[in-house]
Every structure is written in structure tokens, then in C-alpha cells.
Image (cartoon, rainbow, N blue to C red):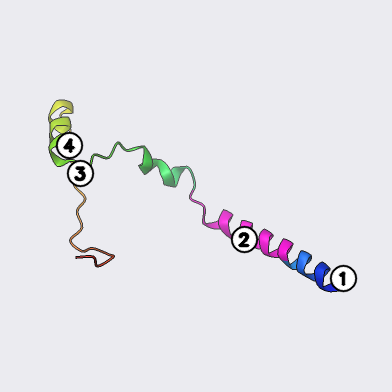
Amino acid sequence: MRTLMFLAIFAALATDDLAARAAAIKPSAKELTWLGIPWVLNLAEAQKMAREERRPIFLWAAGDDPLERC
């Protein structure tokens, strides 16, 4: 019986600790504003939109595959 009580208390503490850690690393609303940007994956479509809206294109390219699949 004591073992079960200990495990229940330990599980509760672990759950509280996990919730505290998750809250500590959760991004704020301000940090997530970039998600509101209408990213376009097709360059030709982005060029067309940029011409129509008279806006520049922000091109983000990476030269390395982080998963090394190539």
C-alpha cells in the first residue's frame, strides 16, 4: 500500500514538473507572429504575387539538408 501511495505522489509531482517545464518553453503570442505571414512555397507564384502587390520577395533558402538525405 505504501508503494502505491509513493508511486501516486511521485506521478503527481512528475506531472506538475512536466507542466511547469512546458509552460517555461511555450512561445508567447508575440513570438508566434511570424506564423501569420502568408509564406509561398512556389517561386513563380511568389513572383506573380510580388508584382501584383508591388512588394519585395523574402527568399529563404538553405544549402544543406539537416537530415542528410541527399
Q: Residue furthest bottom?
A: 3
- Whether tag 2 and tag 3 are in contact, CB under 8 A, the answer is no
Q: What residue range appears in magenta?
A: 11-27
Q: Amino acid at mark 2?
A: Leu
Looking at this view, is 56 or 26 the one in front?
26
Name the spot of residue 24 as percent of width and height, x first: 56, 57
Residue at numbered disc 2:
18
What's under tag 4, amino acid-wise? Ala
Q: What kind of secondary structure does the magenta stretch mostly adopt?
A: helix
Which numbered disc, 1 or 3, marks the residue closer to the eye? 1
Q: In the figure, is residue 61 to the left or right of 39?
A: left
> Which of the two labelled residues, at mark 2 and mark 3, occupies the earlier sequence position?
2
Q: CA distance from mark 4 to mark 1?
A: 65 Å
Q: Residue 21's x, y, as percent?
A: 58, 60
- How many angstroms separate mark 2 from mark 3 (CA)? 38 Å
Q: Secondary structure at mark 4?
A: helix
Q: Secondary structure at mark 1?
A: loop
Q: Would you say residue 46 sits in the magenta stretch?
A: no
Name the residue tied to disc 4.
Answer: 46
Which mark is in front, 3 or 4? 4
